[in-house]
Image (cartoon, grey):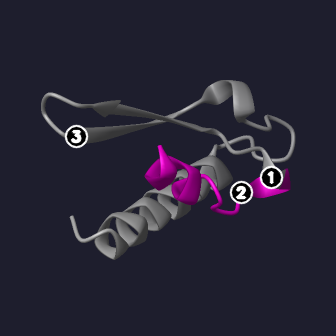
Amino acid sequence: MALVRDATAAPSMHNAQPWRFRYSRRSRVFHLRADLRGSLPHADPVLRALHIGCGAALMNLRVAVAHEGW
């Protein structure tokens, strides 16, 4: 889906992209989850950068959705 592609262009620490999106067609809802497989335990031990990266991805999704007129 193009909206998720736009959302995943968000910056993240070392470009780890520690997030996963899921879209429910029936309810027309996006779900964003942190993906701990993309975490960097030595560089980001308290997961602050992971949360900031997920927030950036969510903001990109919101902009993409607004651009599409949703």
Mark 3 vs mark 1: give the one in front. 3
Element under disc 1 = helix
CA distance separating discs 1 and 2: 5 Å
Sequence-first disc among 3 and 2: 2
Residue 15's disc number: 1
Element under disc 3 = strand
Quadrant of the rendered image containing residue 24: top left
Q: Is residue 13 left or right of residue 59?
A: right
Amino acid residing under circle 3: Val
Amino acid residing under circle 1: Asn
Give the class, few, some or many, for how many residues have Cα within 10 Å of label 1's Cα (few <14, many ≥20). Answer: few
Q: Residue at x 33, y 34 (%)?
A: 23
Q: Residue at x 80, y 38 (%)?
A: 40
Quickly name the residue at label 2: 12
Which residue extends farthest left? Answer: 27
Bounds of the magenta segment = 1-14
| Numbered-mark total | 3
Residue 29's disc number: 3
Q: Residue at x 64, y 28 (%)?
A: 36
**Residue 55: where, in percent of width, then height?**
48, 59
Which quarter of the figure is the C terminus placed in?
Answer: bottom left
Pointer 1 and pointer 2: residues touching (CB < 8 Å)?
A: yes
**Residue 26: where, in percent of width, then height?**
14, 28
Depicted 3 relative to depicted 11: above or below: above
Amino acid residing under circle 2: Ser
Q: Is residue 69 left or right of residue 2?
A: left
